[in-house]
Image (cartoon, helix red, strand yellow):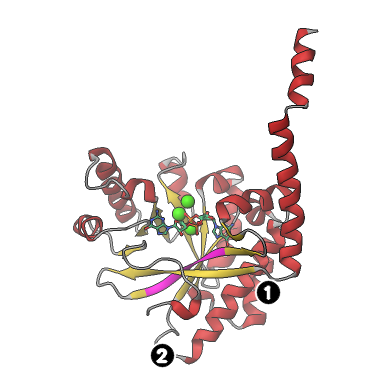
């Protein structure tokens, strides 16, 4: 009886109820946002060893009519739980491909790549690769300039299926990055078997790379590992010249972070 009482209490917990209704509000808001085109992409430069921009990462932004800019960290999980991520993810891919095509005319932009974040639910959809193949065909975007960013947990849930999907897309030129590398639990055996092109060193290791010997060791280990497996590496969250110099000395050749440029609307990119 005591247990049931506690459950009842918990059921009417006002904090939980508030959280649940906030989520329901956000779901309704997200649906409307998709219809009313309140989403936009910001682009953050990825630079090479010499500081030249080689591509960008597309980062989703929601311009909410009342709340202003809502962070993807807040709405992506809700979109994922409600399944709205399928339409939202498709919108992001379409917008990125349209941007690639728009960049074709200008010699300064025609070689840039765009990296797009893919959520677990989106990737697991049985038609994921078909949708992207169709989109590349209809948009005319160059598959060699599209990079897809996946996370470790997403890949490990259905490993064999993931390998097949990645293979289908890689065969036409799409490349794959493992995002937030080092924060998950992928084993080296898995890593070796995944058809990947690059690893992204998570920003949590880059932040204190100059002051925390453990983070420095992890960053070096990732760079060595990538080198032995013939994978590229992008260091994320580089905010200072010191961090860049350390990573450069350790063999890193691609960087992303506020030191080089924040995510901005396309017309504000310095190329
Ligand atoms: P992420 O893919 O790891 O993206 C990097 C995040 O780090 C971005 O946050 C970016 O603005 C931020 N960042 C970049 N440079 C620096 C830096 O030097 N210092 C610091 N402190 N932060 C930096 P953002 O834009 O808020 O995105 C958060 C997450 O939301 C992303 O993490 C990604 O997981 C997710 N996300 C964003 N756009 C999309 C999307 O289109 N689809 C999906 N499925 N997820 C997305
Ligand atoms: Ca990413
Ligand atoms: Ca990341
Ligand atoms: Ca992240």
Q: Main secondary structure of the magenta part?
A: strand
Which region shows up in magenta?
A: 54-60
| Disc 2 target residue | 107
Of circles 1 and 2, which is in front?
2
Label 2 beta carbon less than 8 Å to ligand 1: no
In the rendered image, residue 32, in percent from the top left (x then y), is placed at 76, 63
In the rendered image, residue 31, in percent from the top left (x then y), is placed at 76, 60
Residue positioned most to the front = 66
Return the disc, 1 or 2, that comes first in the chain's sequence.
Answer: 2
Q: Is residue 92 magenta?
A: no
In the rendered image, residue 19, in percent from the top left (x then y), is placed at 69, 39
Q: Return the mark for residue 260.
A: none
Residue 161: tell me if it is visible: no
| Disc 1 target residue | 134
Residue 217: tell me if it is visible: yes
Q: Residue, x 49% and y 92% (percent of image)?
A: 105
């Amino acid at each position: 009886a005591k247990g049931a009482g506690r459950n009842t209490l918990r059921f009417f917990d006002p904090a939980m109820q508030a959280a649940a209704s906030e989520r329901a509000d956000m779901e309704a808001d997200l649906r409307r946002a998709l219809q009313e085109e309140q989403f936009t992409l910001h682009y953050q430069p990825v630079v090479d060893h010499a500081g030249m921009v080689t591509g960008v990462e597309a980062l989703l932004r929601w311009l909410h009519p009342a709340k202003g800019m809502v962070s993807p960290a807040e709405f992506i999980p809700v979109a994922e739980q409600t399944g709205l991520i399928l339409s939202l993810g498709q919108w992001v891919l379409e917008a990125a491909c349209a941007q690639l095509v728009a960049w074709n005319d200008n010699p300064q932009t025609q070689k840039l790549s765009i990296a797009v974040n893919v959520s677990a639910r989106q990737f697991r959809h049985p038609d994921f690769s078909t949708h992207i193949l169709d989109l590349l065909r209809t948009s005319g975007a160059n598959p060699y300039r599209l990079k897809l960013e996946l996370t470790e947990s997403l890949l490990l849930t259905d490993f064999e299926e993931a390998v097949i999907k990645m293979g289908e897309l890689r065969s036409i030129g799409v490349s794959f990055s493992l995002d937030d590398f080092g924060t998950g639990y992928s084993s080296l055996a898995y890593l070796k078997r995944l058809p990947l092109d690059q690893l992204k060193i998570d920003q949590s290791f880059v932040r204190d790379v100059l002051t925390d010997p453990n983070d420095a060791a992890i960053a070096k280990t990732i760079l060595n590992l990538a080198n032995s497996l013939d994978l590229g590496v992008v260091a994320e969250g580089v905010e200072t010249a010191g961090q860049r110099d350390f990573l450069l000395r350790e063999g890193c050749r691609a960087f992303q972070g506020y030191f080089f440029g924040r995510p901005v609307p396309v017309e504000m990119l310095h190329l």
